[in-house]
């Protein structure tokens, strides 16, 4: 190649041209192995040091492998958490199957939330006409309410949507569910029961403000709501 020709090639080439060429012909360095001995890249950790292209490729692959390992660990952790949650829902289903009447059903729901799900702050608002008679025996967990009552208007949006919601709730909603003297509720998962919430509302509270947040998946909450709503209407 003449000097003028080499200069012309150098003038026409740029980083994009070279990158495009190597993407089209990734085996270029296999066919021109001698070039690898001449190529050097600045070392990213030691000023003034150089590494070969192969060494740099190995380093990039190692970093990529570490990133993939982190993502895999995250997926495994999520899978394990989902598996544990599915097991808890299975135990809830077993409790509900064994319940023979409304009171036993309410107690089964409360017991499962407290023992299986470690949900110590939970409330069941029930719209059934005979629910009021169960309140003394069901403790603070059960609240009987008239769906047409004015103080339930604060839940209209939730009931009309028919879908669970997670996050922080308004003070009026928190006071209605957990009492005015409750200050340890930082976040809540609300689940309407039945079609458009015609059976009631299941509320699970947590002291951690991040325990239930708007971005979290509500798929399992929907399943719990369906199980509980069906059991309460048997």
Image (cartoon, grey):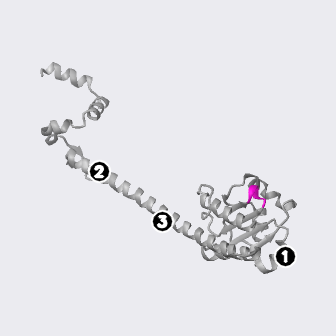
- Residue wearing tag 3: 80
Q: For mark 2, does the 10 Å Cα neighbourhood hold few (<14), some (14 to 19), or many (20 or more) residues? A: few
Mark identifier at residue 133 = 1
Q: Position of residue 10 (x, y in %)?
A: 22, 25
* Magenta-colored stretch includes residue 173: no
Which badge, 1 or 2, comes first in the chain's sequence?
2
Residue 209 at x, y percent in the picture? 63, 64
Residue at the image position 21 percent from the left and 44 percent from the top? 53
Q: How far, Cα to Cα, is label 2 from label 3?
A: 28 Å
**Which residue corresponds to the image point at 12% horizontal and 20% vertical from the top-left?**
2
Does residue 79 appear in the picture of this structure? Answer: yes
Query: What residue lies at 25% left-to-right and 47% top-to-bottom?
Result: 57
**Could you say which quadrant of the image residue 98 lies in?**
bottom right
Disc 3, SS? helix
Reading the image, the residue beneath label 2 is 61
Q: Earlier in the sequence, mark 3 or mark 1?
A: 3
SS for dot 2 = helix
Span shown in magenta: 194-198
Image depth: mark 2 or mark 3 in front = 3
Pointers 3 and 1 in contact (C-beta within 8 Å): no
- Write the residue at 67% across / 72% down: 96
Q: Secondary structure at mark 1?
A: helix
């Amino acid at each position: 190649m003449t000097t003028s020709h080499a200069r012309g090639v150098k003038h026409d080439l740029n980083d994009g041209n070279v990158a495009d060429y190597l993407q089209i012909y990734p085996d270029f360095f296999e066919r021109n192995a001698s070039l690898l001995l001449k190529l050097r890249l600045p070392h990213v950790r030691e000023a003034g040091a150089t590494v070969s292209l192969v060494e740099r490729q190995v380093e990039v692959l190692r970093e990529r492998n570490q990133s993939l390992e982190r993502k895999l660990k995250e997926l495994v952790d999520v899978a394990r958490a989902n598996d544990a949650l599915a097991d808890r829902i299975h135990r809830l289903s077993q409790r509900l199957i064994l319940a023979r009447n409304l009171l036993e059903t309410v107690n089964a729901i409360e017991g499962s939330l407290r023992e299986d799900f470690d949900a110590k702050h939970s409330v069941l608002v029930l719209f059934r006409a005979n629910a009021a008679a169960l309140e003394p025996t069901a403790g603070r967990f059960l609240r009987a309410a008239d769906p047409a009552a004015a103080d339930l208007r604060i839940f209209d949006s939730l009931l009309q949507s028919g879908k669970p919601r997670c996050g922080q709730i308004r003070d009026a909603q928190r006071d209605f569910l957990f009492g005015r003297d409750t200050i340890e509720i930082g976040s809540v998962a609300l689940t309407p029961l039945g079609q458009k919430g015609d059976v009631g509302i299941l509320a699970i509270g947590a002291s951690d403000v991040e325990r239930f947040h708007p971005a979290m998946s509500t798929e399992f909450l929907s399943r719990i709501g369906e199980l509980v709503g069906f059991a309460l209407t048997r």
